[in-house]
Structure formats: structure tokens, C-alpha cells
Image: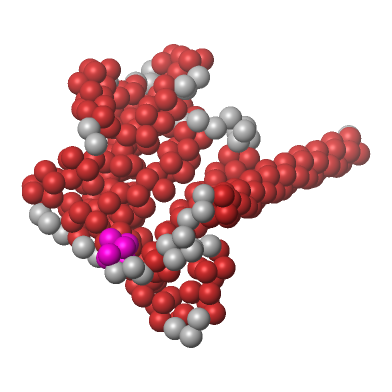
Amino acid sequence: MSEAVQTQAILVADLRKQIRSTALKSLGRAVGKSVLIGLATFAIVLLIWLAVLTFFGISPYIAKGPLDVWDFLVVDADAAENRAVLAANLEVTLRHSIIGFVVGLGVAILGAILFRVSRAAESALMPVAMLLRSVPLIALAPVIILIFGNGSQASVAVIGGIVVLFPALVTMVFGLKAASPQMLDVVAVYGGNTLTAVRKVALPGALPSLFAAIRISVPGAITGALLTEMLSTGDGVGFSTLQYIPQAKFNDLWAAVVVVTAISLLLYFFVQLIETVVLTRMGMNTDRRN
């Protein structure tokens, strides 16, 4: 009897090792694929940049290439000063981006849960979200600034939040509605209410949609921050780019645009990498993204 128990224990241990090895290999493939996609995206962006400069005949005085930006930030005698100015502006922009990201994504998640719990709330509030999406933000911005104050953190939160809100809300609503009907029936059979079904089934099943919403929201939050700085706060990268154009500081302008774009892509793929690790470890198919 003891030999049978020992044999069973050995078989279970071997099975666990096989499962762990398979999971690690799957995780490695998924992470490697995400890294390759990120590198390929950066390469494509760089090639498009060079192609535009080469084939459209833009004056080198205005258009700057990758080497020009590299010289401006690394090689030139005043490169350290250039980096310091850009870093100071970038710090402000990232702070504004975080505010818009947190507000917009938070409202989107809460709104999606509310819509999943109450169809009446969805019918009443979704048209408002559609209205915010359809009206150009450049037209809404003066009203928002008038209400919340020019340069205030509230205006940063509202403008940045609006940019993030709609795509994140639609993505989360779709994810929550895609919950397994069989699992929802199991919760109902055991006496669970709608909130229990959302907490136990819909939210865990909507993790791919949540990560998709976060990936979408990251560049959206940076865009909202740049817009806010141009129209309201008068600082950060957004406002500095407006000053560079009339001052003919095209090296500064291109360096700011390139760095902001690079950071947006890096953050996007960083979130995608975390998504790949989490969903792979949970056994979800990371190839089926919303």
C-alpha cells in the first residue's frame, strides 16, 4: 500500500513539473512575442520618419532627422542643458497625464460596472458619453476651463479624463457583457445577486478588456495632457512646443515630439508586457485582445 502511495506521489510531482515547465515555456514565448512586436513597431516608426524626410523634400531647416535629435540631446555642447529643459517639461506633462489617466480610467471602470448592473443607467448615461465623444474637445475646452478655472488641476483632470474616458468605457462595457452565461447561471442558482455575478464572474473575465482599456488610455492620457497644457496650464511639453514654432527652435520642437512619442510607445508596450505575463499565468488567451 505504501509503495502505491509513493508511486502516486511521484507521478503527481512529475505532472506538476511538466505543467510548470509548459507554463514557463508558454510565458516565455508570449513575452518574446511582445518584445519583438515592440521592437518592430519602433523600427517601423523610424523608417516612416526617414521616408517622410527623404521623399517629401522638406527643408532641413524645419524637418529634423534621428541624427539631428540625437546630436541635440547627446552630442552638442549644450546637450546637457537641452536634456534638462526637456526633462523639466516632461515631468510636468507626465504628472498631468497621470491625473487624466487615473480620472478617466477610474470613471470608465465604475461606469462600465454601473452599466452592467443597471440597464436603465446605461440607457440614460451612454448618450452623454457619446455626446462627449462626438463634440470636438477643442470646442469643449474653453467651457471646461471657464467652469473649473484656467490652469487648475481640475481642468487637467476633466480634459485629460474626457480623452481617456470614452474608448476605455466602451472597451470595459464590452468586456463585462462578454461574461460566460453558464457561469452567471451558476451564480444565480446559488443565490447570488447581480453584484455578486459582476464581482465573481464578469470582472475576472473582463481582465483582457481591462488591460486593453489601459493600453488605449496611456497614449490618450498623454494627448489630453498636451492639449491641456496648450489651452489651460501654460506649462509642460504642450505649451513649450507652441513657443518653439514662432521662435524657430525646431531642434527643440522635434526633440520634444520624438521623446513624447517614444515614451508613449514604451508605456504602451510595457502595459502590453504586463498583460501578457498576467493573462498567460491565468491561462487566458492573450491573442484574443479587445
Does the magenta segment cover residue 242?
A: yes
Q: Is residue 58 left or right of residue 277?
A: left
* Res 233 seen here: yes
* Res 5 seen here: no
87 versus 64 height, above or below: below
* Frontmost residue, 290 versus 117: 290
Task: Say which residue appears at 62% left-offset and 33% top-offset.
Answer: 287
* Frontmost residue, 135 versus 98: 135
Does the magenta segment cover residue 140?
A: no
User: Main SS type for the magenta part?
Assistant: helix
The percent position of residue 161, horizontal first and vertical second, equals 27, 45
The percent position of residue 163, horizontal first and vertical second, equals 30, 42
How many numbered marks are there? 0
Q: Is residue 70 left or right of residue 285?
A: left
283 versus 104 height, above or below: above
Q: Residue furthest right?
A: 3
Q: Residue furthest bottom?
A: 77
Task: Say which residue appears at 58% left-offset and 39% top-offset.
Answer: 279
Task: Say which residue appears at 33% left-offset and 30% top-offset.
Answer: 112
* Frontmost residue, 5 versus 23: 23
- The residue range painted magenta reads 240-246
Q: Quadrant of the N terminus?
A: top right
The percent position of residue 93, horizontal first and vertical second, equals 33, 61
Task: Say which residue appears at 57% left-offset and 54% top-offset.
Answer: 54
